Amino acid sequence: MCGIVGYIGKQNAFPILIKGLHRLEYRGYDSAGVALISPENQLNIYKAKGRVSKLENSCKSKDVSGHIGIAHTRWATHGEPNHSNAHPHYSQSENLALIHNGIIENYVVLKEKLIQKGYTFQSETDTEVLVQWIEYIKESNKTDTLAAVQLALKQVIGAYAIAVIDKQHPDHIIAARKSSPLVVGIGENEFFIASDASPIIEYTNKVIYVEDEEIVILSQSGQPKIISLSNVEKTPQITQLEMDLQKLEKGGYPHFMLKEIFEQPRTLRDCMRGRINVDCNNLALSGIFNHKEKFLKARRILILACGTSWHAGLIGEYILEEFCRIPVEVEYSSEFRYRNPVLYPDDVVIAISQSGETADTLAAIELAKKAGAFVYGICNVVGSSISRNTHSGSYTHVGPEIGVASTKAFTAQVLVLIMMALAIGKERNSISQKQYEQILSELDLIPEKIKSILKQNQAIEDLSKIFTYAHNFIYMGRGYSYPIAMEGALKLKEISYIHAEGYPAAEMKHGPIALIDNEMPVVVIATHDATYEKTISNMQEIKARNGRILAIVNKSDDNIKKIADYIIEIPQTEECLGPLLSIIPLQLLSYHIAVKKGRDVDMPRNLAKSVTVE
Ligand code: G6P
């Protein structure tokens, strides 16, 4: 949700900032802008509505000189995506420029005060209010910019990662964070700031994760300085990053999403590496092992997440209850945090988040921690806020996921939950050794089985042509396939903008069946599992009403061939591992339908990859 990037050093800032914005564009792409202090001490701001490439093109004839600058790519919160609402914003005197990721909740009150003092505004944004407020404090208190930022942020309610430059002090960037991510990169006599490490990794692997209510001062000379809002100086903790630059590129695929779908055999192998032994008879998850008494004593497990991660959580519910015999509840973080949930100190909370930055999940974690619950994180982004704010956890280790629609992170989240269920089940003696080893051996085969599904990519692309006409889709499944029906539907709506619903198959007759006619495609996950026969009956009910069925079936399923209009075959596996296979053709189907409809697959309209506002 909005990407911010900044540079100070000896190099020309502009190309570094533009490249950084391209890397951060997955966070928001409504508009983009850059502010540079030129060698002649001009503070130049350039902005464009739309993508970073538009900004880049529009700057071709402009003065983009300068060794210090900040830049922003926006996901609109206050005010429509247009030129004047794009960041950076000037202060009234045009001495300061500011970029912001987050929401200033009390901006209306501050804006009214400023208007009374004669300030005027060019945009509808909360961000412009903040930069004006900083300048107002600076002038009325006759103080420097740093002190003004400190004072202003103390009066602000909301979430922010900001960066400010001041043309009267062209050798500094001042940045700060509260509830929105901010990373500082430390190069040789040059420094970077960004919303995540992806714009930085090309230049340095040394980073500092800025904590809440900390301000960082970067200068042309000297090391970064960190102070708190209340002026206490802190020693910066430098972390070494292990991130592969190649993983941030498309690697020959037309879209990141397709690349990420195809990476899944490898990413799942990476996720198992070092956790499942070569003989497939033992599993070690240190995050569980080091806190095993928490899982042995757990009264209940609560899974908190949003979006696709929430769907992974639903699969987690089935598998944890099956193998650990602990009651599990799965909640949207955004609902959980705003009701008055009953929490016990012997609850275990599992927070799932690809980005590790989702604002609602972070807030839900804080609530659970306050109630004394033990919080376990499943995150992909190493060093992210959620991974740092949980008691223990497991990384999914799939590398950067850039496509806005989550694919490889989802399967790895499900895999981590499967491994957790096996590890906890073993500690609690609620799974037999035979079943434990059987599932571990089968897990080892999953990457190859996914490869065999990916070989059907062309056939799925051909099939996708049939469905581009549709305005609505229903997905249905039972048991472990029910969350997959919801995830399949979510993938389709996110990137093709076709309305799609995922339903438990048996619920169809309680309403959705009224929608069935010969134009309604129904995708059914009908693999050989405990409810296979029941799913067939549900398919018959759809056929009796002329619905068009696309069924995901196990190989050589002649029964379903007779009922379904179209089929995609996937290999057989253990029932609890079925989601790892059945989601793959659904990811491909959504992808190809979206491409055929000419959609912007990696950056679908209105969405953002990392939702750092609530
Ligand atoms: C956004 C993304 C989704 C993601 C959800 C939760 O909506 O577009 O792909 O599932 O946020 O994000 P998280 O990073 O917490 O998994």
Image: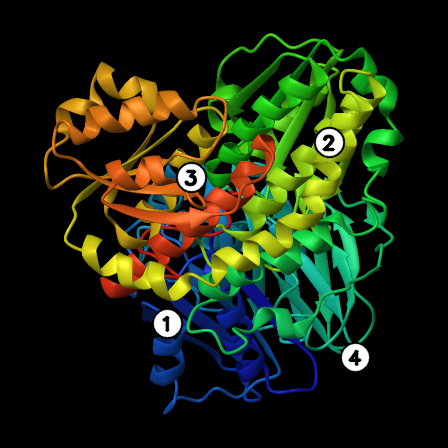
Q: Name the residue under label 1.
A: 47
Q: Is residue 565 rendered to the left or right of residue 1?
A: left
Label 4 near label 1: C-beta < 8 Å? no
Q: In this view, does 278 lie above or below 309?
A: below
* Residue 91 in view in this figure: no
| Residues at discs 1 and 3 in contact (Cβ within 8 Å) | no
The span from disc 2 to disc 4 (Cα, nearest Å) is: 44 Å
Marks 1 and 3, the one that precedes in the sequence: 1
CA gap, disc 1 to disc 4? 28 Å
Q: Residue 189, labelled with which disc?
A: 4
Identify the amino acid type marked 3. Glu
Residue type beneath disc 1: Lys
Which residue bears the numbered disc 2? Answer: 420
Q: Residue furthest bottom?
A: 61
Marked residue nearer the N-terminal end (1 or 4): 1
Residue located 31% across and 55% down the image = 605
Label 1 residue SS: strand
Q: How crowded is mark 3: few (under 14 residues within 10 Å), some or many (20 or more)?
A: many
Secondary structure of the residue carrying tag 3 is: helix
Residue shown at 50% from the left, 78% from the top: 252
Q: Where is residue 354 in the image (x, y as percent from the top left)?
A: 59, 46
Q: Image check: 270 left or right of 520?
A: right
Answer with left or right where residue 416 lies relative to residue 314: right
Foreground tag (3 vs 4): 3
Residue 47 screen position, x and y as percent: 37, 72
> Visible in this render: residue 486?
yes
Q: Say which residue label 3 marks.
A: 487
Label 1 C-beta lies within 8 Å of the nearest ligand 1 atom: no
CA neighbours of label 1 inside 10 A, class few (<14), some (14 to 19), many (20+) = many
Query: Label 3, label 4: how many angstroms apart (C-alpha)?
Result: 47 Å
At label 4, counting other C-alpha atoms closer than 10 Å, the crowd grade (few under 14, some 14-19, many 20 or more) is few
User: Looking at numbered disc 2 in the image, what kind of residue is underneath it?
Assistant: Met
